[in-house]
Amino acid sequence: MFRNGFLLLLMSVVFYHEHANAQKKKETLLSEKVTQMMEWASKRSVIRMNGDKFRRFVKAPPRNYSVVIMFTALQPQRQCGVCRQADEEFQVLANSWRYSSAFTNRVFFASVDFDEGSDVFQMLNMNSAPTFLHFPSKGKPRRSDTYELQVRGFAAEQLARWVADRTDVQIRVIRPPNYAGPLLLGFLLAVIGGLAYLRRHNLEFLFNRNVWAFSALCFVLIMTSGQMWNHIRGPPYAHKNPSTGQVSYIHGSSQAQFVAETHIILLFSILQLFMCIAGIGLVMLFFSWLLSIFRAKYHGYPYR
């Protein structure tokens, strides 16, 4: 009986040491992975991954950090213009997080290019790009961990809201300064001011109702046009399937649209306007011919 107790005690000690060693190895491995991810993030806000890096730092445990990955196809032969636009917004989001005062190792941003990690695309049964996925620190990705690109667009602000919903990490998007808008506005104001100064003795046009009505109509049309929706939501210009190469210019949902749809509708509207003007011109032309015939027959009637 004493021997059995001694054996049980010995087995407990061995099991405890093995468990402690396993836990220590797990913590060491986790520390190495976090250190490596932090080192990569210090060099590039968006970590470029291939198949080996993805399996080691994203799929394989242990992991106590979340990873937001953009699956894309940026090589020129892929001709994915949407991928480049989405990549620019993703870079803005990652830089806003990396260089903020609240930056921690809770979440990292990475990208997998199709030509560098086609095995990852096959592993995840993915056949379109760009696609954004969130890999949580615990468990497998859920349906909500896939970003609804066709509905939300790829603007950095929209991506930040999605990341906050999935990770509770609040990212304040900071864009690099763009002086094109203020310079253009200043130039426009200078032109208007110069014209007003040159015509300072004849400013009756400022009190013309037709001018203000036309300006108000143009402003309303601009604010209610599809281009304003594109500016706010930041949708892709079109969608190209990297596996088939088929390009879609019309979105399949009534809740979203591509930028190309706005241009197509604008082109059709312009053509319709010209057709209406041409139709009115033809009506006036043939009606004048008709009046000329009556004028030739009834000289005394005042045709005007």
Image (cartoon, rainbow, N blue to C red):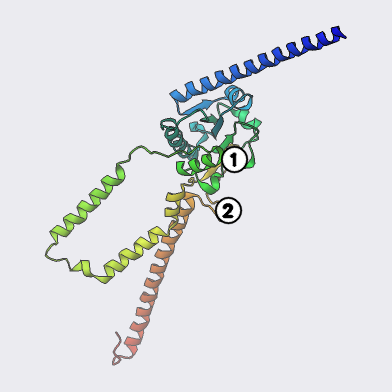
Left/right placement of residue 141 relative to residue 195 reads right
Left/right placement of residue 188 relative to residue 289 reads left
Q: Position of residue 66 (x, y in %)?
A: 56, 31
Tell me the residue at 33%/39% (across/down): 177
Of the two numbered discs 1 and 2 on the same chain, state the one appearing first in sequence. Answer: 1
Tell me the residue at 41%/70% (across/down): 279
Kindly state the secondary structure of the residue where label 1 is placed: loop
Q: Which residue is mark 1?
A: 146
Q: Please state which of residues 286 and 7 is positioned toward the viewer in this rendering.
A: 7
Q: Which residue is mark 2?
A: 253
Query: What's under tag 1, amino acid-wise?
Result: Thr
Question: Quarter-wise, where is residue 20 in the image?
Answer: top right
Q: Position of residue 34 (x, y in %)?
A: 54, 22
Name the residue at the front extreme: 2
Identify the image quadrant of the N terminus. Answer: top right
Name the residue at the left extreme: 201
Figure check: 154 above or below 5: below
Q: Position of residue 223 (x, y in %)?
A: 39, 58
Tell me the residue at 31%/64% (across/down): 215
Query: What's under tag 2, amino acid-wise?
Result: Ser
Name the residue at the top extreme: 3
Q: Position of residue 292 (x, y in %)?
A: 33, 82
Q: Around disc 2, counting alpha carbons within 10 Å, would you say few (fewer than 14), some (14 to 19), or many (20 or more)?
A: few
| Badge 1 vs badge 2, beta-carbon distance below 8 Å | no
Q: Please state which of residues 33 and 68 is positioned toward the viewer in this rendering.
A: 33
Q: CA distance from mark 1 to mark 2?
A: 18 Å
Report the disc number at residue 95: none
Task: Look at the image and tell me whether residue 129 can be seen.
Answer: no
